[in-house]
Image (cartoon, coloured by chain):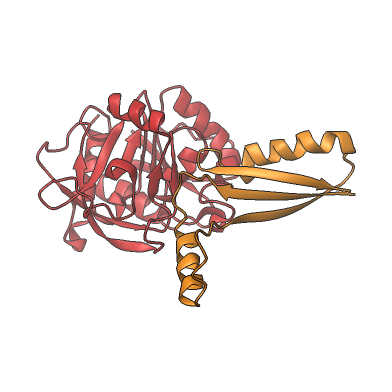
Amino acid sequence: MKFGVIVFPGSNCDHDAFYTIGNLMKKDVTFLWHKDHSLQDVDVVIVPGGFSYGDYLRAGAIARFSPIMDEVIAFAKKGGLVWGICNGFQILTEAGLLPGVLTRNANRRFICKYINLKTDNFSTRFTHSLDKNQILNVPIAHAEGNFFASDETIKRIEDNGQVVFRYCDENGNVTQEANPNGSINNIAGIVNEQGNVLGMMPHPERCADQILRNTDGAEIFNSLVMA
Amino acid sequence: MLKANVYVTLRKSILDPQGVAVKNALKSLGHSEIQSVRIGKFIELELDEVAENEAEAKVKEYCQKLLANEVMEDFKFEIIK
């Protein structure tokens, strides 16, 4: 299984993802430059966190039109695995690969802290090996993570089980207090209808190495590489 | 050369935290009459070699494709000769 991590001008979690896959998961991984037109036969594309193109206009709006994104869109439509983290999630919504949009945090602040995540869908390639009772402790770092979509879109993705992760408290209760950014229904991560494209605001690549004393993030990577 | 002024605003149903902060600031300055503040973007475009009758469709396309995200934003524009 080969991974590709896209590098946009302003990406800053590309190396974290690369390190997690290459050094911790011991899988083949390559960087994919935003101006390239080839995905180099990777099996999984990671759209990493950061501030692609300075987040000018809207987060993800300009990155979405990078040459490599045409390839990512075609790859995703054929069922290829695509995983957008933070800014990557924003880019995937702008690209139309995922529904909804990430708007300004309700409290107006950039939020950088650990949050708790409850997994709601264990049937995706990204989550199938997760422990059903485990609450994942993963950091977020964003100013625009407030998931919004029309009422009918929310109903559709909820009915389809497309909500994969929700912000919760340490006991797994999905409460208003545990919602850091104002996201509808505490939504922290969703998949597309086919389940091959995942977008999430929390950063599992930042809590995968033992040296950081928290490897909750590695479990999502493990799920992917287990196949 | 034609110019276009584009206005992009958050949809009414979406919380505008910047607007709320500015409303509170205006109120704290004593302007108790302020009921609501919504903040948007103003984008000035200059168009070369575009006929007047094509400009409207072109600018609309820019807005739909890139300048606004219609999931959360509305746009309007005016063409200036």
The image shows residue A219 at horizontal and vertical percentages of 20, 43
Can you see residue A85? Answer: no
- Report whether A200 appears left or right of B46: left
Rendered residue at 33%/51% (across/down): A182
Between A190 and A217, which is closer to the camera in this rendering? Answer: A190
Q: Residue at x 52, y 66 (%)?
A: B33
**Residue at the farthest front position:** B33
Viewer-closest of A18 and B59:
B59
Foreground pick, A172 / A220 = A172
Vertical relation: A202 (above or below) A75: below
The quarter of the picture where residue A65 lies is top right
Query: Which image quadrant: the C terminus of chain A?
Result: top left
Residue B41 falls left or right of residue A161: right
Compared to residue A166, the image places residue A150 above or below, namely: above
The N terminus of chain A sits in image quarter: top left
Q: Residue at x 55, y 44 (%)?
A: B73
Q: Position of residue A103 (x, y in %)?
A: 45, 49
| Chain drawn orange in the picture | B
A190 lies left or right of A35: left
Q: Hey, which quadrant is residue A106 in on the image?
A: bottom left
Residue B16 location in percent, x, y?
Answer: 47, 55
The chain assigned the colour red in the figure is A
Taking B16 as reference, is A223 above or below it? above
Q: Position of residue A63 (x, y in %)?
A: 56, 46
